[in-house]
Image (cartoon, rainbow, N blue to C red):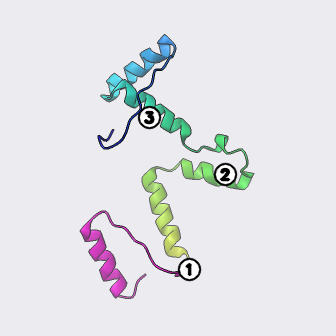
Amino acid sequence: MSSDRTFARISLTIPPDVLRRADRIAKAEGRSRSWVLTDAVRRLAEPTPERLPRLDNSRRGMLQADLALSPTERVLAAERTAHEAPVRRFGALFVTFDRFEDYFEWKRHESAGGR
């Protein structure tokens, strides 16, 4: 967990067997008990088809297929979709980069006519 975040200290009452499981997970993962419990809450809050009952069967199937992919596979699929979609420019373009090299590559690509 990052040191630049603000944390809340809480008191938690849980069954002893659940606490033992949390401690075993923490030890196996080399993490703190707080990290294990925070991660469990984050995972529980992630969207899953079961938690989205208003989806019709078609969209539920699409979501299940997407959730079966790894994060890397999802990004690659999104990039393929973006490359197949028609280009539409509406107003200003806002682009971010993780590295200067990525920016320079994008700049070279754009100056060569894009796409």
Residue extent of the magenta highlight: 87-115
Tell whether label 1 touches label 3 (CB within 8 Å).
Answer: no
In the image, 5: left or right of 104?
A: right
Is residue 114 in the magenta section? yes
In the rendered structure, which disc, 2 or 1, sits on the residue that comes first in sequence?
2
Residue 15 at what x, y percent from top left? 51, 13
Q: CA distance from mark 3 to mark 1?
A: 39 Å
Secondary structure found at label 1: loop
Residue positioned 48% across, 56% down in the render: 74
Q: Which residue is mark 3?
A: 39
Residue 77 at what x, y percent from top left? 50, 62
Residue 57 at what x, y percent from top left? 73, 51
In the rendered structure, which disc, 3 or 2, sits on the residue that comes first in sequence?
3
Dot 3 alpha-carbon crowd within 10 angstroms: few under 14, some 14 to 19, many 20 or more: few
Q: Is residue 33 above or below residue 113?
A: above
Q: Amino acid at mark 3?
A: Asp
Which label number is shown at residue 46? none
Residue 1 at what x, y percent from top left? 33, 38
How many numbered discs sit on the rendered protein?
3
Dot 1 alpha-carbon crowd within 10 angstroms: few under 14, some 14 to 19, many 20 or more: few
| Residue 107 occupies quadrant | bottom left
Q: CA distance from mark 3 to mark 2?
A: 26 Å
Which label number is shown at residue 61? 2
Q: Amino acid at mark 2?
A: Gly
Tell whether label 1 touches label 2 (CB within 8 Å).
Answer: no
Q: Amino acid at mark 1?
A: Pro
